[in-house]
Image: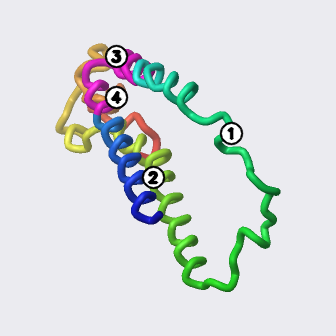
Amino acid sequence: LFQLVSLLTGWKNSLKGVGYFLGSALLEVSYEAALGFMIGLIVIAMPFAIFGLDKNLGTAKKKNSSLKEIFVLDNFNLNVLSLARLFLFASRDFWFEVPLPFYLRSPNCLALGPFFPCSPQDVDTCTSGAVCDPTLDYCTNGNEGG
């Protein structure tokens, strides 16, 4: 069972990785192309999910479990492992959802400051994420706190 679970988890994570890299590569072409291609892949997979899976998948075969049955208090190692997995996956999901997008859209710090003068009339003088400050006449970070 553990080998099967690790195999399925590995396949799932590999497929997610391919999706991340494919999506980021397509973003270099255009956002609309990346979005359209990813939606196309989902549309291709939907018939297999709708018609290929058992209709009873996800339904309980017996009565619902109570909280006392779910939380096993007599196996300390299992509880420590479960808590570690909770923090590991929660921190990973938090990182991908909150700080990483801010980091990726912040400007290159080497292109900010008085050594990079700009003109407020020419919007392309600053790098992506940076804005031309009309009072200082040089590129500054447009994102608050970043």
Check disc 3: other Cα within 10 Å, few if <14, some if 14-19, many if 20+. Answer: some
**Between disc 4 and disc 3, whose residue precedes?**
3
Element carrying mark 3: helix
> Which one is closest to the eye, mark 4 or mark 3?
3
- Marks 4 and 2, how far apart at CA: 26 Å
Q: State which region is magenta.
A: 22-39
> Which one is closest to the eye, mark 2 or mark 1?
1
State the colouring used for the structure image: rainbow
Q: Foreground residue, 10 or 95? A: 10
Question: Is residue 50 found inside the magenta-colored segment of the image?
Answer: no
- Marks 4 and 3, how far apart at CA: 27 Å
Element carrying mark 2: helix
Which residue is label 1 attached to?
56
Q: Is residue 124 left or right of residue 49?
A: left
Check disc 2: other Cα within 10 Å, few if <14, some if 14-19, many if 20+. Answer: few
**Between disc 3 and disc 1, whose residue precedes?**
3
Which residue is label 3 attached to?
33
Which residue is label 4 attached to?
131
Which residue is label 2 attached to?
95
